[in-house]
Image (spheres, rainbow, N blue to C red):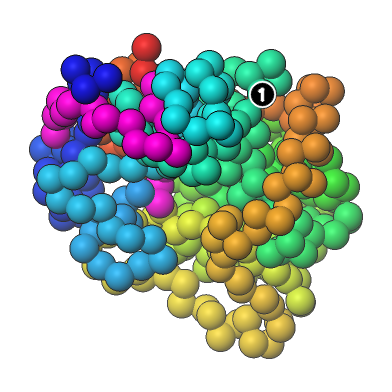
């Protein structure tokens, strides 16, 4: 095992504004001997996610910053190829947190075994994984969704947003609206069953959202993946006692200037709105409930999930950069053939 080598993507420098390829480097390193209680996993696919941009800054946050000149990490799915733990055997397919590399050595308890007969490996990074749980927990618990609600989802063609809208429809939403960044993505949202959608590049978000609402008086739930102007627009058209699940703020992740919006937060007082940020890690108790429902929806074909697949670890930095620019539809994953 000591003769085995593994490639990994390291953070070479911290991005200033938008990330660029020079911020990353590909390095080959020997795989260490396998300690007792640990497993060696050959990664089959890894996830690139917007939250990773924040970890590239040397700033205090909810998640530890990536270290310079060290491998990045993140969600991955792979096959156990060697084990020194009774709880895992060779051939097991597991999800874990050491992506951005070909091989991972980690404690067996830091992996979660999945059933590859349910779906392809990448699904466990998306609809059947943390992405799906984020959508479900954010909508049902954080935003306290109720049947009959009108729901607005920003970044709705992304991995989380596309599932939020479809889950809301399955649970009885009266009207679901999504925003996206191109006419093609808007058309895709309508194909997924959204009742309305708009391209946020085509004008002021507030006007586009009001138009997409049609006859609906206002929105009851806003699932926020974007922040900025779209959060401001949602606050403006929310009904009294509306609820906002603040999942992400991708519109400001690469900004070097303070955000210009929202400028209308005081409106939340008179409308008695609830704005609640959340991390999926605080809602793991919903994992079983979510998995059962999502497996049923996927089997019935009433919920669909999309993937944008990039092949090769060496292309992972560009996949991440493209994700930041909105090049993905659904979950962005990198396969490691």
81 versus 305 height, above or below = above
Which quadrant of the structure image shows residue 313? top left
| Residue located 66% across and 23% down the image | 115
**Viewport quadrant of the C terminus:** top left
| Residue located 40% across and 51% down the image | 51
| Residue located 80% across and 22% down the image | 299
**Can residue 316 be seen in the rendering of this structure?**
no
Q: Is residue 5 left or right of residue 22?
A: right
Q: Residue 199, position in %: x, y?
A: 52, 42
Is residue 38 shown in magenta? Answer: yes
Is residue 326 shown in magenta? Answer: no
Q: Would you call the spot at circle 1 few (<14 residues within 10 Å), some (14-19), or many (20 or more)? A: few
**Can residue 40 be seen in the rendering of this structure?**
yes
**Element class at badge 1:** loop
Between 4 and 33, which is closer to the camera in this rendering?
A: 33
Q: Residue 274, position in %: x, y?
A: 67, 76
| Residue located 56% across and 85% down the image | 266
Q: Is residue 196 left or right of residue 32?
A: right
Q: Is residue 175 left or right of residue 99?
A: right
**Viewport quadrant of the N terminus:** top left
165 versus 337 height, above or below = below
In this figure, which residue is indicated by the disc labeled 1? 115
Which stretch did the figure color magenta? 25-51
Q: Is residue 290 left or right of residue 211?
A: right
264 versus 20 height, above or below = below
Between 129 and 250, which is closer to the camera in this rendering?
A: 129
């Amino acid at each position: 095992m000591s003769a085995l080598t593994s490639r990994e993507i390291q953070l070479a420098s911290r991005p200033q504004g938008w990330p660029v390829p020079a911020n990353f480097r590909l390095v080959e390193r020997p795989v260490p001997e396998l300690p007792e209680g640990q497993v060696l996993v050959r990664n089959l696919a890894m996830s690139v996610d917007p939250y990773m941009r924040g970890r590239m800054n040397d700033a205090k946050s909810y998640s530890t910053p990536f270290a310079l000149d060290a491998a990045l990490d993140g969600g991955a799915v792979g096959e156990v190829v060697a084990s020194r733990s009774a709880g895992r055997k060779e051939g097991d397919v597991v999800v874990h947190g050491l992506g951005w590399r070909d091989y991972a050595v980690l404690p067996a308890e830091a992996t979660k075994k999945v059933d590859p007969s349910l779906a392809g490996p990448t699904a466990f990074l998306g609809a059947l994984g943390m992405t799906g749980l984020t959508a479900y927990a954010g909508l049902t618990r954080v935003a306290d969704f109720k049947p009959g609600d009108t729901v607005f989802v920003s970044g709705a063609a992304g991995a989380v947003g596309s599932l939020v809208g479809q889950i809301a429809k399955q649970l009885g939403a009266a009207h679901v609206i999504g925003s996206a960044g191109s006419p093609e993505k808007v058309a895709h949202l309508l194909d997924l069953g959204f009742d309305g959608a708009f391209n946020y590049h085509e004008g002021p978000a507030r006007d586009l959202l009001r138009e997409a609402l049609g006859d609906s008086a206002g929105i009851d739930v806003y699932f926020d993946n974007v922040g900025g102007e779209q959060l401001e627009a949602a606050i403006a058209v929310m009904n009294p006692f509306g609820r906002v699940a603040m999942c992400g703020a991708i519109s400001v992740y690469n900004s070097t200037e303070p955000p210009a919006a929202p400028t209308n937060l005081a409106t939340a007082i008179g409308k008695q709105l609830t704005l609640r940020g959340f991390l999926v890690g605080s809602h793991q108790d919903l994992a079983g409930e979510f998995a059962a429902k999502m497996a049923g929806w996927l089997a019935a074909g009433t919920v669909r999930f999309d993937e944008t697949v990039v092949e090769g670890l060496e292309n992972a930095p560009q996949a991440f950069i493209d994700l930041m620019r909105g090049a993905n539809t659904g979950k962005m994953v990198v396969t490691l053939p």
